[in-house]
Amino acid sequence: MECRANYRIVNIPRVFTRQNSNNIYAFAFNNVQVNGENPYLNAVRAMKKKAGKEYEQKYSNTEKFIRLHGA
C-alpha cells in the first residue's frame, strides 16, 4: 500500500516560496462531497468564524485553495 495514498506531489510553481530539490506533498482533496457539501470547506469556514480578525485572510486563502485545487 502506498504510504502517501491520500497525498499527491505538488508541482505548481506559485505555491513555493523557495526552490526545493525534494518532492513536496499535499493532501489530495479529490473533490470530496458528503451529502452534496465539502466537509473541508465547512470546517475551514467554521474555524474562520471562531478565529480572530487577524487570521481571516489566512482562512480565506485556504478556502480559495481548496476550491481551486480539488473541491
Image: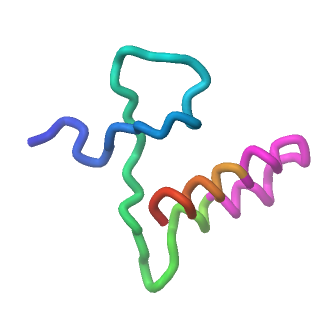
The residue under the point 37% across, 51% down is 28
Magenta-colored span: 44-60
The residue under the point 32% across, 43% down is 8
Name the residue furthest left: 1
Residue 34 falls left or right of residue 4: right
- Which SS type dominates the magenta stretch? helix
Q: Quadrant of residue 55?
A: top right
- Identify whether 56 is placed above or below 68: above
Estimate the x, y position of residue 33 in percent, counting from the top left. Answer: 42, 75
Q: Which quadrant, please, contains the N terminus? A: top left
Estimate the x, y position of residue 23 in percent, counting from the top left. Answer: 34, 25
Instruction: Say whether residue 67 is magenta.
Output: no
The residue under the point 41% across, 57% down is 29
Estimate the x, y position of residue 19 in percent, counting from the top left. Answer: 50, 17
Residue 66 falls left or right of residue 35: right
Residue 63 falls left or right of residue 35: right
Name the residue furthest right: 53
Q: Quadrant of residue 3?
A: top left
Instruction: Say whether residue 49 is magenta.
Output: yes
- Identify whether 56 is placed above or below 67: above
- Identify whether 29 is placed above or below 37: above
The residue under the point 51% across, 78% down is 37
Foreground: 52 or 15? 15
